[in-house]
Image (tube, grey):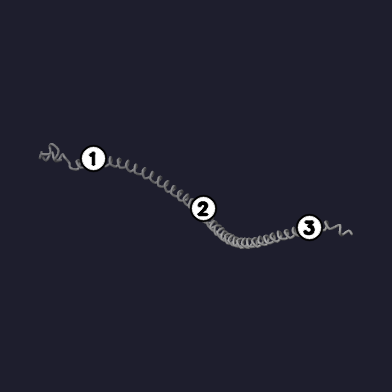
Amino acid sequence: MRELPFSGKRSTSYQNCLDVSVILCNGLKSVKSQLQECKVAHRKDITKLQDQLSEFKRENTSLKKQIEDSAIQDSKTIKQYSDKIIQLESKLSDSENFVNIITGLNKQTQSWITEQEEKHKTEKDRIIWRSDELYKTIQILSDENNRLKAIQQQTNDQSAKSNKHFRGNRHYCRR
């Protein structure tokens, strides 16, 4: 009321005209109007926020579903990998057993080969010794054969001489 241009008038009749309740009612109407406008604006904001909340809830539900699906898929993948690991471990164990068997067989084979080499070396040494003995015997027999041939040749020569001599003396024998 002080802001009104005629507020400085001090007349009681004027003051009686101005009822404080009317002024207050007008002020209240103005505030109520402003509140109504704010309420409408706030309702729009609340509606927007509720729409956003609904969208977030849908996205949250969708993300939860995706997480559940992903967890199920991850569980399946983990199961597959676990099965594959068990399978590979089994193959590895089989391979290790196979390698152990092959290693054992290889050791046995190497032992047998070494044993056979020793036997063959011993047999070879025996054969070489026997061959040397036979060679010596052959040499002795060859020398003996040559000596016998020489004796036979001498005998043949003496026989031929005797026969010649005997033929030459034949005329004495007939008489």
Residue 66: x, y in percent?
44, 47
Would you name the residue on which mark 3 appears? 161
Pair 1/2: label in front: 2
Is the residue 139 above or below the residue 62 in the image? below
SS under mark 3: helix
Q: Is residue 62 above or below residue 152?
A: above
Depth check, mark 3 against mark 1: the one in front is: 3
Q: Amino acid at mark 3?
A: Lys
Query: Left or right: 5 with respect to 170?
Result: left
Q: How many marks?
A: 3
Q: Which residue is mark 1?
A: 30
Foreground disc of the pair 3, 2: 3
**Viewer-closest of 48 and 132:** 132
Q: Which residue is mark 2?
A: 84
Q: Measure how far apart labels 1 and 2 are at the Cα level.
A: 78 Å
Left or right of 68? Residue 144 is: right
* N-term-proximal mark, 3 vs 1: 1
Spot occupied by residue 114 in the image (x, y as percentages of width and height): 58, 61
| Badge 3: residue crowd in 10 Å (few <14, some 14–19, many ≥20) | few
Residue 42 placed where, x, y %? 30, 42
For the N terminus, which image quadrant? top left
Residue type indicated by callout 2: Lys
Name the residue at 28% across, 41% down: 38
